[in-house]
Amino acid sequence: MRVLIGELKQETSSFNPRLAERELFEELCGDEIFSREGTNTELAGALDVFAEHDDIEVVPAFAAWSCSSGPVATSTLDGLTDDLVTAVQAEKDDIDGAYISFHGAMQGEEEVDPEGRALDRIRAILGDIPIVTSFDLHGILTDRLVYASDILVAFHTYPHVDMYETRARAARNLVRLLRREVEPTVARVQLPMLVRGDELITETGLFGQAIRTCQEVEASDGGLSAVVFIGNPFTDVPDLRTNVVVTTNNDAVRAKEVAESIARFMWNQRDHLKADLVELDEAIRIANETESLTVFFDAADATSSGAPGDSNHILRGLLQSGYDRRALLPLVDPPAVEQAFAAGVGATVSLSLGGAIDPDRHPPLACDAYVQSLHDGVYRMEGGTLESGGRTAVLQVSSYSILVTTLPVSIMGPHVFESRGLNPVDFDLCVCKSPNGFRTHFQAIAESIVPVDVPGSTSANLRSLPCTRCPRPMFPLDDDVTASIEAVVKE
């Protein structure tokens, strides 16, 4: 049996003013996809499962992914989609099934459902064969995705650590479909709610209870997939909401009952699924009183959620408060990097820091900076993949080391800092531009972790976001929101 695999992934913040161009995307064509083997990635999980079966031949098509960022430029999105579809078209003969990996929260400059559009085109080419899709649990589920997929699976962890396992689950479901062992029945509940905050941490928070129910369903006889898509609140599109999707083996009654039960739990807990944020002045006070490492997480400028990474609000606040301990901060600022490279290591330069991409939210900060080191920007992520922040400079301002990159980088673990000779444990304060993904690696080394309330295009203060396209009324954007806890079974 010949199984085609492909990938198209990006997570968008609609409020990031910089469009994502093609240079931000990593691309693999054909057999290059096999280079993902051995990594903690979605494609690797699927490849390993298919390799267990001597009667399955993997047909690699096309894969493209990027860091989270602003909406994808029309020319870039059209080009990437065409490349994926063209690769599928070239391999369509004698294909028995397909596995396509998405993030689910991609938005185009004009297209509001890029994944649905791509999957529709793939389905039209491949016809009525099994297609399994996988997603981030922050994915935004559209009708096109539901109806063009036979089975959908998604992450079960937040922070995300089960990328490999999720795609392995997708691949196992596809094998069962190919062997005609199962007949999927899909039930879906749509909830008018957006959620943030520590209660989403699946190991310790309330959201974990819903996820464990999903896992119990999948581990049971007749349970194929159970997912809670909480959406990405910063992808302001017409289908943004929370979705509960349960897939059983030809058991519509069970699929409907379980989906409604999970949805009812999520809706009843909605007031607890909001972020508790700390004002910057109070956060700095906590940092001053903490003996060892304090981590500020700047979810409002989370590059892992689509923000540009150019916020200087915490830097400005530290300088204005007179904070004089050692601090480590990341910043995306291409002009500052160029100035640093022009001046060279050891020079002191007068420049503006921050606001290079979103100056309306983050007015540039004039300061003098010492150029400590310069780098090509390549580093290895904790999952084993090579990434790049473009040309990179480490600048010293006051007692602060600032990692300044040309391109946005995801601050999930310390590797991005360590690759530049900056170990977070050597500092009193470290800023992570991430909503919670950093916790997997920083929880063990930080004495205090503080969610800082500052402006940004991915703020966990959801009412501060200028949403115009998502459905309304929507919790917590509006008051007195009601929900219908009724599952629709896919026909």
Image (tube, rainbow, N blue to C red):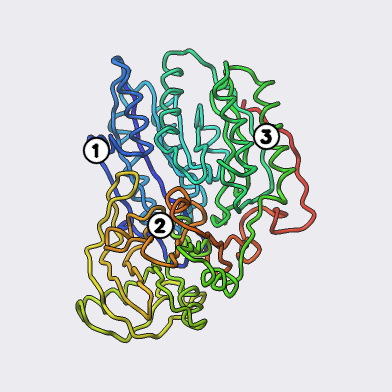
Residue 376 appears at what percent x and percent y? Answer: 22, 63
Which residue is tagged 2?
411
Measured along the vertical axis of the image, is residue 241 above or below residue 357?
A: above
How crowded pointer 1 is (Cα within 10 Å; few <14, some 14-19, many 20+) is rated as few
Mark before the other along the chain sequence, 2 or 3: 3
Identify residue type, mark 3.
Answer: Ile
Q: Which residue is mark 1?
A: 35
Contact between labelled residues 3 and 1, with CB atoms less than 8 Å apart: no
Q: CA distance from mark 2 to mark 3?
A: 31 Å
> Which residue is at a point 43% across and 81% down the rendered structure image?
364
- Residue 257: image x %, image y %? 70, 26
> Residue 142 location, x and y as percent?
56, 42
Q: Quadrant of the C terminus?
A: top right
Q: Is residue 473 left or right of residue 311?
A: right
Which of the two discs, 2 and 3, sits closer to the camera?
A: 2
| Residue 244 in the image, given as x and y percentages of width and height | 63, 36
**Residue 262 marker:** 3
Q: Is residue 313 left or right of residue 34?
A: right
Under mark 2, the amino acid is: Ile
Q: Closer to the camera, 397 or 190?
A: 397
Work out how far the residue at label 2 is from the one at label 1, CA to CA, in angstroms: 24 Å
Going 63% across and 60% down the picture, which residue do you hit? 462
Q: Secondary structure at mark 1?
A: helix
